[in-house]
Structures are given as structure tokens and as C-alpha cells.
Amino acid sequence: MFYRCAAFILLLLSAPLGGPAGAAAPPDTVVMGKGIDDIVSLDPAEVYEVSGAEVVGNIYDRLVEGDPRDSTQIRAGLATSWSVDASGRVFTFRLRRDARFATGAPVTAGDAAFSLQRAVALDKAPALVLRQLGLTRDNVAGRVRAADEGTLVIETSRVLAPSLVYFCLTAPVASIVERGEALAHEQAGDLGNGWLAGHSAGSGPYRLRLWRPAERYVLDANPDYWGGAPANRHVFVRHIKEAATQRLMLLRGDIDYARDLDKDQLDAIAGNPAIRFDRGVQSLVTYLALNQRNPHLRRPEVIAAIKHLIDYDGIAHAILGGTRIVHEAFEPQGYLGAIDDLPFRYDPARAKALLASAGLAEGFAVTIDVRNASPWTEVAQALQSGFAEAGIMLTIVPGDGKQVLTKYRARHHDIFLGEWGTDYPDPHSNAEAFALNEDNSDAAQKKTPAWRNAWSDPAMNAQVAAAMAERDVERRAALYRALQRAHQQAAPFAFMFQLVETAAHPATADGFLIGAGPAENRYAGIAKR
Amino acid sequence: MPASPSVERGAATALRLAVSVLLTLFGLLLATFLIARVVPIDPVLAVVGDRASAETYQRVRIELGLDQPLYVQFWRYVVLVLHGDFGRSVLTRNPVVEDIARFLPATVELATAATLIGVALGIPAGVVAAARQGRWADHAIRLVGLVGYSVPVFWLGLMALLLFYAGLGWAAGPGRLDIFYEDTVAPVTGLILVDSAIAGDWAVLRSALAHLVLPAGVLGYFSLAYISRMTRSFMLEQLGQEYIVTARAKGLSERRVLWRHALGNILVPLVTVVALSYASLLEGSVLTETVFAWPGIGSYITGSLLNIDMNAVLGGTLVVGALFIALNLLSDLLYRWLDPRTR
């Protein structure tokens, strides 16, 4: 005891003077710094947050996956082939025979049917993706079924574009869970939800070793993964919220990947020869929404004028740096039917003329609700300055993220500055959000951004429905292109930017794949030299 | 046999104290509950996200009891708390008690180390500044205190990281431990310094100490600034008293006058200052916790509040409030020990 106390006191005195007690990461272990306090669960049936989707993407497989090289294409996942019958409602998936869960049990069509039925039955937030297929708690047991050990059948409630069905099945909520493991840990009929929130039962390249909310998660590689063993054995992701801290830890070699660097931090290490950057355009779009309950914002000339009062390039360059690109349509770049048209440029003279034609030559006053966080307050200030050029007095109303969203959902805003990510990598996801509003009443069931801004256009509602059901991929893409061009001109939304996810890492590490969305980010290729 | 008057007085004091503590905690709970309910944030959003269907939204709203009147919601919560159940956190899915047991020790460890630094340096600095009033030592110490008061803790933390961690490599980086030591020591108290010592795992202890130095130094600097300023002020008041003049006239050494007589007489108010400083570090070190990726109770309560995770907010607030009260009681006990007149 005496020696233990003596050693304790000696260490107490010597450790701070002796410099850091470093435990360097071995070459087979990847350490990332990232803000992960948004994760509330790692059950695929419940995951609806950015960081959680990334974890689920790496520990579970789905029937089909989006192709990371071309996100308009579907590629094989656990299913090796898939088809739809002549009725357009019955989809058949044949599963690979070599896939096994982390426990060693084979992946069967029974597991796949259970996973989809379970997600619908639990009815957590992401269940809305599967409801697109017409699956409900009442019908899912009959509509999703295992024809045999290796064949899964899904019957939709109406004719849908096959690509819509397949893309919905690439979402995290459609991940395949091991039925036996989930049910072995079931409590009070929760289908294993409580246990799966912090454990994994998947067949993906990793299994979850540990998740401590707002602290870290640790993944261990699955060496027997059917797609080949990952290039590393462990991935540690530590919750580091502050971008400057991430940069310092990257430069010191305490982390291999810094995931949330902002413009200032990226600028600071841009010329560092020891640092490399992985970049990928992701599906998050930044937009302004104009509430149609405001009599000024309802006028088409005002909507057009505002779209000409945004200094898209200036904001992208000076405030957002390499973290966003200018993008003026609701479908993210890389999606089926996406367009890269940029019909609006900062043009105060034209905006003034449009306002004058609306009888508002002297301008008017209006508020903008914005998250009280960088860079959004700076973007709002830039908008304020631009709007003032045409006499529109913009008052910035900053608030916490949830506070701003609460107000937005209640339709109490004038202008809202926000971001929107797709629920699944199909164009219908954002088309439904921004162009579809069939019930504009306060009691509406769907409170999409179109509804939140009290905007409904029957012609566009019909276009969205037609595109959703179009079975020919090329014709479907053309429908979305036309829809977006009409939307750009008429809708009370000004799309401005699209996210460019950037991961900084030393030259000695490589292979992180940034997909079209967080659920498509993959760790398996990361190797350290 | 009837109890003696002194025992009766003691029992009455203890009863008054218990009632006062319970009323304070109840008031704290009620105020926090009402504040969290009147802020314009929808708690259901934290659970179901922004895009849930109206049906899902309504189901969760009922599950959370938000369809009930406020007084019913509060009463239900109080009944649960009285049964020792603080509920589950919406964000972490854990029982709030478990979360607090995980996050609070990290903050206690940090705040204690910072307070020790603040006391060890702040009190002598304040005494020296008072003794050398108007001279360069006084100016230097006041300048150090002024900087401590004026510079944002967030900025100072980043600068400390930049210089001592990234630049000179003298200190370990953010976090409580090197990541590979995480979970290698079984938690007993939750205080890694203590747990690693109990386990005899000196490598973990060394890592924990190396990680603690910088954030504790930054927070300790702010504590030092406050304590030294207050010590100086108390000392100046004492040094003008007649008993000090008498002591000097009787030929006592200056050291004895300062450190024995003057400092001895300011210990009572200093205890309050140190207790207040410690209490403020327990719940007010959110920014330092953010910069140093330190998983403490401040970040936990703040994050929960921004998501209207009510069980976590109320549980965390109650625990921090109880700590404040405990520190006040401890101050009272120390008064009695330090000042015989209060016994």
C-alpha cells in the first residue's frame, strides 16, 4: 500500500512535467475526430441522424446499395439480382448465399423480411421511407415475405417507379438485421429496439464494439465479410465538437481524420504538404424559404427579386469556403434527374425593377429566422446586406436549431434559412418535400417544407405524382428536370448551396470513401502506411 | 427523560436546515421545469426528428405525456423523483442517473484540479499583492487577474492547446485519456485519477494526468484571477486594522503579521469565495469542456437543454443544485471550525 501511494504521488508530480503520455494508434487502427452527439440510437429502424446513418452504413448491409461512383445507379448488396413483375407492384430479390452475420449465422430472406417488417412495425421516424412503398403496420406482414431461404418478395400498394423502390431500400432503415439476435434481446415487445440502440446485429464490414453517447464509438472489422475484409481492423471515432481542436489533433497525429473542419480551419492547413483532403458532394442543400402567408412574399415578382438579391458566389467564396458549392435546384447534384442550371445571379438592378413592378419600389421589412451558429449567422448578414440594396429591410432572428425548426414547422416565420438532406437517395425524396403539398390546411398530415411555407401548386403536385410512378428511368429523369426548372421559376424557395463534405487526413492514411450521403460513407478502404 | 435544551436546539436547527434544503431543491426543480416548458422549442422534435408523420408525432407526444396539463406533467415527474427514478434521457437512451454518474465525475475531477490550482496560487498572490500595494508586484498580480477576468475562456483554451499541445508538445491533447486507454480501467468512482490508482494502472494514471493539466490549468487560471482579487481586497481591509498596527509595533515579523494574523482573519470569507468558485466551475465549464472534448456535466446539461431532453435537464440541474447546497453547508461547517465565535 505504501509503495502504491508513493508511486501515485510521484506520478502526480512528474506526469505534467514529463509531457504527454502518448499511446500512438497502431497502423491497423483508424482514429477519427467528429461531432457525434447527434446519435440517439444505432438501431437501423430508428437511426435518422447524420452520424448514426454513417455508423449503420458501415455495420449493416442492405438488399441493394447506391453505386458510390454513380449515385444514379443501383448495385448489388445482399441481393445479387432483383426484378419487378409485369404488374409493376411485385419486386423479387434473390439473396447471396455467402453472406453471414457477425455471429456467423447465414443471412436469409427470413432475416430480410423480419428487418423490413420490424422497421414498419416500430414506426420510428425513418419508417416514413418504407411507407413510401405503401407498407403499413397492418399490411407489412403480408406484403414483405420470404418466398424461400434466398428469395424476398416485396409487394407495393400501387405502381411505383422501380428506381424509387430500389433507392428506398438503400436507406439505413432498410438495413438487414439478424432476426435471432434482435429477438433474443427483445424486451416488452420492442423487437430488440432497446438492445440494438447500442449494439449491432449486422452482416456489414464492421461490428459495433462500443458506443458511448456524446463520447465515442468503436467499430471492429469483420474479417469474414463477404465483400472482403476491411483494410483496417478497428475504427475509433471520438466526439470532438470544436473544429479548431480537430485541426490541432490532426496536426499532432492524435487523430487520422478530422471530419468537421470549417472554412477557417481548412484555410489554415490548405498549404500543408503533410495533409491531404478527401472531398465529396453530399445531398444536403441550403435554401431560403419564403412563407406565403406573408402578403409581400406571396407576390411572384418579390419571389423572383429575392432570388436575384442573393450573392451566391460571394457567400460561397467568402463565408463557406470549400464546404459548399453553389447549387440552385432542389435535387442534389449527383441524383437522378439533377440539373446544374444556375438561372439566378446577384443582380440588384433587376431585383429593384421586379419590386417596382410589384408596387414595392420602396421595399418592405421582413424577418429571417436562422440558426444561431456559424456560418449561418454570417450568411444571414450577407443576405441582409444584399437585400438592403433593393430596399428590403431584413431583420435577423437568430435562435437555437430546434427553436428555429419549431417556429418553421408552425408556419410562424417570414423567411427561413435552413438546410435539407434527402431521406433516401431518390429524387422523389426532395420532390415530395419541396414541390408536393396536397393539403395546405393546418391539420395536414404531411408537414413538408412546401406545407411549412403554405405553398401549394396543383400542377406541380400532379408532376410529382407522375414522376413517382414513371417506370422508365430516362423518362423519369426528364420529368424531374422539367419539374425543377418550373420550380426554380415559381416556387417560394431559393436554393443556394450544396454540401461538400471534406475529411482531412495525413498523407500516410488513405481510402476513406465519401458517398452521396452520410449513409454511403465507408471506412473499409482506409489503410495507413 | 426530557432532552437537554442544547439537543433540542440542535434538532430544531437540523429540521430547519432539512426543510430549507428540500424547499430549495423543489423550487429549483419547479423553476427549471417551467423555464424548459415555456421556451419555444418542441420537445417532440428531439425524439422523432423534423420529418415524422403527424401520426408518429402525436403518438410520441402522448408517450412523453405532453398532452397532459403542465401541473400533471410536473406532479408525475416529482413522484418519480421521490421514488429515485429520474427517467431516461431522450438523447442517450440511458437512465439519467447513469448518465450523471458518467459525466459528473469528469467535471468534478476537472473543477477540483482547477480549484486546487486557483487556491494554491491565488491566495499567496492576493496576499503578496496586498502587502506590496501600489508596487510592481501588486501591478503584475492585478494584471494577471485582469487578464483572467477579461479573456474569454474559450479563446484561452484554444491558445493553450495551440501553444502547449500543438506547438511545444508539452501537454497531452483533448479528451480525458489517450483513446486507447479508454475503458481499460473499471470505473469505481468515475474519477479516472482515483480509479487508475486503485487499479494500480500507472500508465492510465499518467495519461489521465497529462490530459488534465491543460484544461485544469486554463480553468485554474480563471479561478486564480477571482481568488487572488478577493484575497487582495480582504487583506487590504485587514492590514488597515488596529490589531495589525499593534502587532507590528510589538515587533512581530512582517511574515508573521501577514500570513498568521491577517490571513488567519480572512479565512472565513475566503472559504465562501473558494466554494463559490468551485461551484461555478462545476456547472460553468461548458466552453472549456467543448474545447478540450471533455465529457462533463456542463456539456451534458447544455446539450440536453438545447434538445429539450427534459429528464436529463431536470436531473442534471437537481444534482448540480444539490452540489451547490452541499458546498454551502460545507462552508458553514468550515466557518464554525475556523471562527470560534460562530460555534
Image (tube, rainbow, N blue to C red):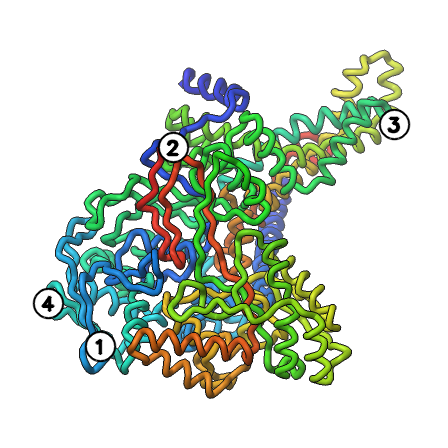
Residue at label 3? Answer: B240
Mark 4 belongs to which subunit? A
What residue sits 62% from the left and 50% below the top? Answer: B16
Lateral position of residue A290 relative to residue A284, left or right: right
Residue at label 2? Answer: A25
Amino acid type indicated by mark 2: Ala
What residue sits 86% from the left and 16% below the top? Answer: B248
Closer to the chain start, of discs 4 and 1, is: 4
Q: Nearer the viewer, residue A456 or B15?
A: A456
Lateral position of residue A496 relative to residue A347, left or right: left
Q: On residue A155, which mark appears?
A: 1
How many numbered discs? 4
Distance from disc 2 to disc 3, alpha carbons, whole Å, reads 60 Å
Location of residue B6 in the rendering, given as x and y in whole percent from the top left corner = 63, 40
Q: Are marks 4 and 1 on the same chain?
A: yes
Mark 1 belongs to which subunit? A
Q: Nearer the viewer, residue A333 or B133?
A: A333
Rendered view: B11 above or below A376: above
Rendered view: A362 above or below A116: below
Distance from disc 4 to disc 2, alpha carbons, whole Å, reads 46 Å
Q: On residue A120, which mark appears?
A: none
Closer to the chain start, of discs 2 and 1, is: 2
Closer to the chain start, of discs 4 and 2, is: 2
Location of residue B143 in the rendering, given as x and y in whole percent from the top left corner = 78, 31
Is the residue under label 1 in contact with that under label 4 (CB below 8 Å)?
no
Mark 3 belongs to which subunit? B
